[in-house]
Amino acid sequence: MIIMIGGNMYCDVLIELSSFNIDKTFTYKIPNNINVLVGSRVLVPFSNQKLEGFVLNIKKDIEDIDYEVKEIIDVVDNEPILNKELLSLGRSLSERTVSTLISCYQVMLPKALKANHKVSNNIKYVDYVKVINKPSKLTDKQQLIINEFKNKDEIAYLDLKKINSSVDTLIKNNILEKYKKEAYRYNKEENIEDKFILTNEQKEVVNIVKENLDTNKKYLLYGVTGSGKTICYMDIIEEVINRGKTAILLVPEITLTTQIEMRFRKRFKRIAILHSGLSDSEKYDEYRKIKRGEVDIVIGARSAIFAPLDNIGIIIIDECHSDTYKQENMPKYDAKEVAIERCKYHNCPLILGSATPDIMDFAKCQKKIYELLVLKNRVGNAKLPSVIISDMTKEQRVNNTSFSEKLYNEIINETRHNHQVILLINRRGYSSSIMCEMCGNVLKCPHCDISYTYHKSKDVLRCHYCGMAISMPKECPYCHTKTLKELGSGTEKIEEEIKKLFNLRVVRMDLDTTTRKGSHERIINDFKNHKYDILLGTQMISKGLDFPNVTLVGVINADTSLFIPSYKSPERTFQLLSQVSGRSGRGEVPGKVILQTYNADHYAIKLSSKNDYIGFYNEEMRLRLSNKYPPYFYLSYLIIKSKDYDYLSNEVNRICNLLKSKLPNFDILGPTVCTPFKINNICRFGILIKYKNEDNLLSVLRDLVDHYKSNNKIRIEVDFNPNNI
Ligand code: ADP
Ligand code: ZN
């Protein structure tokens, strides 16, 4: 919308005030010489500062306002960065998550385009050269340069320079012209075409979706590990592109983006990537490619769901059971719900894919909210691996390590045949805690209510919540004896044990070994190229990865996730074990899995070892019903935080009583302390709300949050369908 000169024009600008948890919209006058567009950022005066804000609305008249209307200082964006769809998506996100509108817009944008990001959004330029005049007489060297332009209009200056230096002379003689062009920093080579003939099962799935590309159907693709879900995605996306539309593919984490990206680049060209492994500048470049309509496919992690594609023809969420699709900070949005809304807007299908769908999503299939698509078989001759439970209450351990004889022997056996092994230990660091054997104290972070993890390679104790690290003390800080003992094993310790036990090449993949840029890719490629025999890692290696030469997967401790106090623990354990098992035997040779556990009789472990998803689903649904958990009941969780413990405990009780009176038909449980109770010196209480119907819940919660919005002592966060309860 361009503003006509003549008469005063005004606009409403949404501003972020970091010290308050409030949305503030203010009216500003638009100076005559400035063009302002809805959805773009503008610079405005605010008290004594200059702030950036989003233009929500442009108007001719102003209502009665009790403040002096000032003028906009400048526009930041010449084009809107939030289009109509994203503007309204932000509004519903803010409503659904009971969070501020500004936080919703900010979360949708890459850092370089957020308001007040304070990062210079530097655009990279590269020198290009083109022919501007017909050359008359040329030397042989010069001719070589000119020949390069036979099939091209322009060539990067540095590429020509590599051929020979006469390019500079040609520029000087006005034959060639040198100019600057915007360049993108994230560039990956495209590979050779790599296409498969679909299996009958795959064809069936793909055809159903292709026939419904003009509908808003929601599919759950339940396909066992190695059944070729990715191939199906590619085939469907190809059809979408042929129809002139675009696609979003979400993947749970960067480990997987790397591999999926490589597979997609073999078949498609116009791809943008958005995930945390990219630098801010690279993300900014990828985002601009998308906005300019230069890509057909966006592949990325959670926030890629906000990719500003115009003409979306399908959204696919791979490994849709993953927790990572839910953001844990405010606004606590669920990318699946955003996807549903965007698919509705674009009238296109949604595919959720997984070998271990969420109980909730599978239940939605039974209620016909989603349509179920099934891939029952692995591709080719591959069978699902046979899973052996190694009962650690009975097994012998090798040399007092974490390895049972069974697992030890299988590792020796498989690697002797030149096969590769994946080992899962779902905890990083060396030991999970340090305890004094004399006084029994466990060393804890002073800022968070959680024990330190020992990281042996750096000889530090680190808090996994606030990141604080101290060097490993020589003696117990409480009783001063030298009797500190490491409890529980993490990836570092297992790596050490592997090096002691086996003469094999091992690579470790966890948060600590993947901080450097490109490290995921390097580890995955090196393992794929068999530079290592063993890939050892945390849950980071469990999902989606496809290494055909892996014939053995070992789970060092299948119980780690079982006893986290959450109703989802059995489901998470089942998913983790099934997923990591799915990495075994994906090629010609049948695979094996060994699960070491102290709870061999637990249903999650037993059923995952039998690859019995339906059995697990039925058992879990039975328990959920009797314990009043989703999908039979909805949950929302209020987290109330403050630095001031006394003040907080008072307010929390008041809030709880208030909710009980305003929501008589809801189960209000609590207040209870969150685990951990304290993070970064901030105390946290939780109130759990269970209900069958949402009724007036949203408006009651909004009122509550609004009531506290300018209270700096307390923060309230609302978490719908929380992951950690
Ligand atoms: P999933 O995502 O379901 O675990 P993938 O898409 O990773 O499965 O496929 C598993 C393996 O099978 C991959 O190596 C893939 O290249 C191969 N594959 C899938 N479909 C076919 C097919 N139709 N023909 C040949 N190979 C296939
Ligand atoms: Zn801490």
Image (cartoon, rainbow, N blue to C red):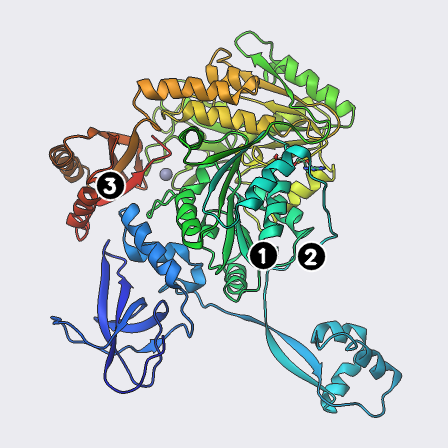
Where disc 3 sits, the SS reads strand
Frontmost residue, 334 versus 673: 334
Q: Say if mark 3 contacts mark 2, CB within 8 Å.
A: no
* Nearer the camera: disc 3 or disc 2: 2
In which quadrant is the C terminus drawn? top left
- Which SS class for mark 1? loop
| Quadrant the N terminus occupies | bottom left
* Residue on which disc 3 sits: 641
**Mark 2 burial class by Cα count in 10 Å: few <14, some 14-19, many 20+:** few
- Measure the alpha-carbon separation of dots 2 and 1: 26 Å
Query: What residue type is disc 2 on?
Result: Glu
Amino acid marked by disc 1: Arg
Within the image, what quadrant is residue 167 found in? bottom right
Q: Label 2, on which residue?
A: 189
Vertical relation: 25 (above or below) 368: below
Q: Which disc is residue 9 wearing?
A: none
Q: Which tag is nearer the camera, tag 1 or tag 3?
A: 1
- The residue depicted at 58 percent of the width and 51 percent of the height is 517
Q: Which residue is mark 1?
A: 243
Which of the two discs, 3 and 2, labels the residue nearer the N terminus? 2
Queried on whether the Cβ of the residue with tag 1 lies below 8 angstroms from ligand 1, the answer reads: no
Q: CA distance from mark 1 to mark 3?
A: 50 Å
* Vertical comparison of 104 with 559: above or below: below
Splitting the image into 4 quarters, where does residue 162 fall? bottom right
Q: Is residue 175 above or below residue 408?
A: below
Tell which circle, 2 or 1, labels the residue nearer the N-terminal end.
2
| Residue depicted at 38% across the width and 58% down the height | 86
**In the visual, does 706 lie left or right of 510?**
left
Q: Residue furthest front?
A: 211
